[in-house]
Amino acid sequence: MNIFAVFTQRVKKCLEALELKGPDGNAPDLSRVVVEAPRDPAHGDFATNAAMVLAKPLGMKPRDLAERLVAELSKDPEITETTVAGPGFINLRVDQSVWQKILGSILAEGLGYGGTKSSDPSKVNVEYVSANPTGPMHVGHIRGAVVGDALANLLAFAGNEVVKEYYTNDAGSQIDTLARSAFLRYREALGEDIGEIPAGLYPGDYLIPVGVALKDEFGSDLRDQDEADWLPKVKERAIAAMLDLIRSDLAALGVEHEVFFSERSLHERSGSNGSKIDHMLDGLRTKGLVYEGTLPPPKGQVPDDWEDREQTLFRASDFGDDTDRALKKSDGSYTYFAADVAYFEDKFQRGFKEAIYVLGADHGGYAKRLQAVGKAVSGGDTEVIVRFCQLVKLMRDGAPVKMSKRSGDFITLREVVDEVGSDPVRFMMLFRKNDAPLDFDFKKVTEQSKDNPVFYVQYGHARCCSVLRQAAEELSGQDLSDSVLEGADYSLLDDIGELELIGKMAEWPKVVEAAADTHEPHRIAFYLHELASSLHGHWNRGKELPHLRFIDSSNTKLTVARVALVRAVSLVLSSGLAILGVQAPEEMR
């Protein structure tokens, strides 16, 4: 039950009843009319912009239109007060029974309250993390992993059919470097003194087990082979080992992808039929989207793959990109961008209506080119959405923690999760908008205080569970199942704190909808913090005013109503935390 959508429809029906016509004789477009919570709760329960957005197309003054609409709205028995504010905003107050219905709806829908069930869900692909399989996940991967995972959860809760995907960059020079690094550890496992790791190879100790596994499988056979012979074998084993390591690291963070898509599969030829990239290029040529030409050097730092020569180019600028993009290198091999195009084409062929890419801030120039690919390949049928995650600065004892993947001395994702736990990591990564920088303080995220957002929200859920347990003990014999609570006498909940809690829960479906539409999962974390704050605030009032406490063993009817309120809060908190991938604990120790 989205109460804001319900009252938006009521406002629109009242507008239709007025039979308003513009100067052109046509009825106005009502699509911009909305009902929202007023910025100041003292102004009312709801506010509508109807008069403000319709006055101009109707050729009327906003306040005159507002007065007419107020007269029509006043006929609604559930609207108890209507006022016109400022130039024409309309504020509404509604009967208490409206809030009672919301509470009943939450208990009836349970954890599904605020979500959407669609008979024809839209297919959405969310690709996130997609780090090169050359080592364990490091702290720089955490934010993208959490944001992508929570976004996928959010879109699924909002009624979409979502696939969580990881694009494995298992082709290219970095994989050859990985294989040579693993081969060095293989020689070490055979007893050789390999000395200092040569520059250009990966020095991390995480490759030592790979070397041991190669020795166990091949003995010393690989050592005497030419590189052309051992490289493919070592490459295959090293990639598999790194992917196992990556899956394990991500699982510690509660992240599991349903699809690991191999970049190599785009390059592999099927007999004489060519590769997926070959077919993609043929398709672009057929559409007239490829030509032979030269590109001017880009402004600023010139990238390594820029070449001052005639080459095969994709007309990306025709679709909103800043420049056309090269598809082939001077040696005839394909560029990384060519694989990106073929990869998107594969997504399009799998029927996705949205292709979402969650990328690091260092990929800032990718948005326009990926969106251009989406428009060109799908004809606009698949929307490409790109979300960037700014860097995370780790703080310890007031000082930033430095890391360097190149030297092998870097902080892994696993180290962070093992130290503070998955829940604090996930919640804090979402307690700021993804494109804003974030400081992650090891001390702050583990302290048990109201200044720690994840503790504050989880403690809210634990408090709800504590009340429910206490009520079961104090009212032994009283059925407190959800079906019974659904029929409680909610009219007894008339305190301002109780009504504020119900009002805040009434916002949940609207928050979910807005967060899903804007692809901003941080809105869920913000909302949960606000709901927990309302709960804790009302709890604290009960310390000073005993008649507001949730349990009154002398008044069973009132207690059941208040237990219903607490149960509803626990359901919304639990539902929201599930979207974020954070536990909803029943106790805090």
Image: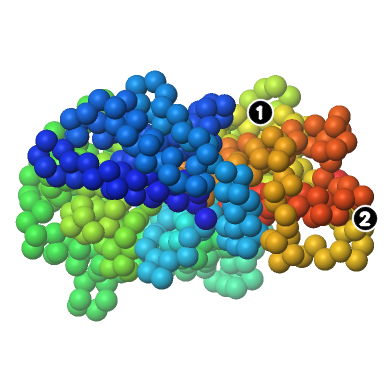
273 sits left or right of 251 in the view: left
Are circles 2 and 1 on residues that touch, CB within 8 Å? no
Determine which residue is flagged by label 2.
Answer: 474
Q: CA distance from mark 2 to mark 1?
A: 46 Å
Residue 431 appearing in the image? yes
Residue 141's x, y, as percent?
53, 44
- Amino acid at dot 1: Met
Name the one closer to the observer, 39 or 245.
39
Residue 137 tag number:
none
Q: Is residue 208 visible?
A: no
- Residue 454 in picture, x, y percent from top left: 69, 40
Q: Residue at x 66, y 28 (%)?
A: 395
Dot 2: few (<14), some (14–19), or many (≥20) neighbours within 10 Å? Answer: some
| Residue 303 percent across, percent down from the top left | 28, 35
Tag 1, which secondary structure?
Answer: strand
Which residue position holds label 1?
395
The amino acid on which the numbered mark 2 sits, given as a three-letter code, is Glu
